[in-house]
Image (cartoon, helix red, strand yellow):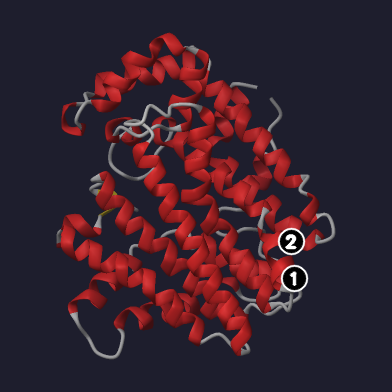
Amino acid sequence: MTMTGTPSGLLTLEHGLRPPNLPFREDETLEEVKAVMLQLAAGQRFERLGAIVQEHLFTGGKRLRARLALESAVALGGSAQDTIAWAAACELLHNATLVHDDLQDADPMRRGHFTVWMRHGQAQAINAGDLMLMLPFIAVEGVEADDQTRWHLSRAIARRAEQTVRGQSLEMTLLSSGMLDWESYAAAARGKTSALMALPVHGSALLSGRPPEEAERLAEPFCDLGLLFQIQDDVVDLFGDKGRGERGGDLREGRVSALVAEHLRLHPTQTRFIVDLLETPRDQTSNEAIDEMARRFEGQGALAAVLARIESVARSIEEAEALSSEPALRSVARALIERSLAPVGHLMEKHS
């Protein structure tokens, strides 16, 4: 297995998509994006729900979708400054899905902090997520563009949000429906994660003057980037640290992960054993059971097979025809590939 990128190249991506040779001050611009998000959360007057959303936003995060919106705009000949409101819209939508996801999965921690539902209860977590689903459309009002472009931006938000919710719903039914195969897993992952990786590029292309059809075409390879991030996230959940306080959250939640799908492809006779584990209530799933599954995934080939899938998806993105005429945008995609591989780089070297 050949690893995409080099260890030194990966290190340069710790605080951004690319080394700091950007035509704008990234840190300052991201602070402007954050300010827009906080202002939108506050609304017209101070009230509790806005404060809850602001509290969640202050927990940080990589701001990956905001960075992607800003860099894509520059790569396509646009302006990062003119993309701030759009970057805020993408981040708000992403954070809405995180709040709802934490509630659905009963995750107590995110980014080293208690999740919204743990701090404020389930009902307020639903409200906070719902508010952040609506705020991106308000953010679009602040985009410097003509009405038709703003309409296309709003349409893109609605369509990508729809795909995300459908993907989340599909993922939640994989186990109960017996859909444990790789194709079903990938369909759910593409819906849940890919849409919100394509959205920043889609909108930035529109703001850079590209026609709607071309904007969608340029965004399409970034759907595979969403799949790539989801697969590596599944690996990190068991063989890394997601900052959620415990290892193997996917297994504890009964989630059909990339590792589960690949393991059952290789060892279908173990289906009953794994289904029984996934159906065990979270508070009854022992650390010993998680450790046993980690040993099986690594020792019986699933981990190596998933890492090979990661490399295959990464290669397909780099070779995407849509990016062949946009070398600057391809560079943004390549940097994202390297960033996604960074948390699993040591595993890819070990299993090469």
| Residue at x 58%, y 35% (from the top left corner) | 345
Nearer to the camera, 114 or 125: 125
C-alpha separation, residue under disc 1 versus residue under disc 2: 7 Å
| Residue at x 40%, y 41% (from the top left corner) | 171
Picture quadrant where residue 78 is located:
bottom right
Examine the rendered structure and indicate whether residue 271 appears above or below residue 51. Answer: above
Q: Would residue 250 be found to the left or right of residue 152 on screen?
A: left
Would you say residue 32 is visible in this rendering? yes
Q: Which percent across, then down, holds residue 123?
A: 17, 62
Residue at which label 2 appears:
329
Label 1 Cα crowd, 10 Å radius (few <14 / some 14-19 / many 20+) = many
Q: Quadrant for the N terminus, please.
A: top right
Label 2 Cα crowd, 10 Å radius (few <14 / some 14-19 / many 20+) = many
Q: Amino acid at mark 1?
A: Leu
Q: Which percent across, then down, holds residue 335?
A: 67, 52
Examine the rendered structure and indicate whether residue 47 appears above or below residue 300. Answer: below
Q: Which percent across, then down, holds residue 336?
A: 63, 52
Would you say residue 30 is visible in this rendering? no
Q: Quadrant for the C terminus, please.
A: top right
Query: Contact, CB < 8 Å: mark 1 with mark 2?
Result: yes
Nearer to the camera, 17 or 156: 156
Q: Amino acid at mark 2?
A: Leu
Q: Residue furthest top?
A: 269
Residue at which label 1 appears:
76
Q: Which mark is residue 66?
A: none
Q: The residue tagged with tag 2: helix, strand or loop?
A: helix
| Residue at x 70%, y 50% (from the top left corner) | 334
